[in-house]
Amino acid sequence: MEKKYRWFKIAEDEMGIPFQANNMAVVEVNGKKISLARHREGMFAFSYTCPHASGILSDGFIDSKGNIVCPEHGYRFNMENGRNTTGEGYHLKHWPVERRPDGIFVGLEESGLFNGR
C-alpha cells in the first residue's frame, strides 16, 4: 500500500532554512519541531530528538556515510530510512522532503501518527 502524505511548505528556498555550520536545522512542521539536514545533494527530515535518550539531533553531526550522529551517546541513524546503523535497535522517524519550484516541502503521513520523536 502506497503511503499518502500531506505536504507542508517550510521555506521558499534553501536560503530560507536556518542551517547551522553542521548542515542541520530545526524547523516547525504542522506545529511540531523536526530536524532537517542537507548532505551532498539531498535534504532529509527526521525526528527532533533521538529515540534513545532524547538528545537533540540537530546538535549532532553528519558522518561521512551520511548518518546523523546523536550528540548524547553517538548513536547513528541513516537519514534516508531511519535505520539505526550502530546496532542498538532504535528507529528514527523520518519524512520525505521535496524541492519544488514554489518552495521546499516536508510530507507527513496522512495516517496521523506524528509525535515529533
Image (cartoon, rainbow, N blue to C red):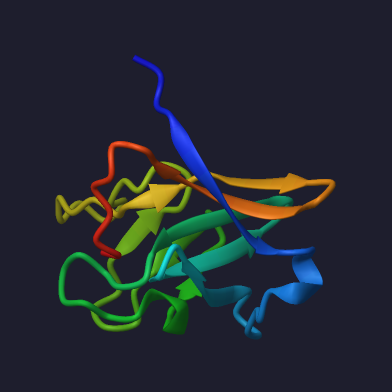
Q: Position of residue 45 (x, y in %)?
A: 49, 57
Q: Position of residue 68 (x, y in %)?
A: 44, 64
Furthest residue toward right:
101
The structure residue drawn at horizontal position 31% and vertical position 51%, both measured from the top left corner, is 85
The structure residue drawn at horizontal position 34% and vertical position 62%, both measured from the top left corner, is 76
Q: Quadrant of the N terminus?
A: top left
Q: Position of residue 36 (x, y in %)?
A: 54, 66
Residue sitting nearer the eye, 113 or 40: 113
Q: Quadrant of the C terminus?
A: bottom left
The answer to which image quadrant residue 46 occupies is bottom left
Tell me: residue 1, above or below residue 71: above
Q: Is 58 placed left or right of 86 in the picture?
A: right
Furthest residue toward top:
1
Residue sitting nearer the eye, 115 or 75: 115
Residue sitting nearer the eye, 98 or 50: 98
Q: Is 35 placed left or right of 50 in the picture?
A: right
Tell me: residue 115, above or below residue 6: below
The structure residue drawn at horizontal position 30% and vertical position 54%, both measured from the top left corner, is 92
Q: Is 96 placed left or right of 87 in the picture?
A: right
The structure residue drawn at horizontal position 35% and vertical position 48%, both measured from the top left corner, is 82
Q: Position of residue 16 (x, y in %)?
A: 75, 74
Residue sitting nearer the eye, 34 or 72: 34
The answer to which image quadrant residue 104 occupies is bottom right
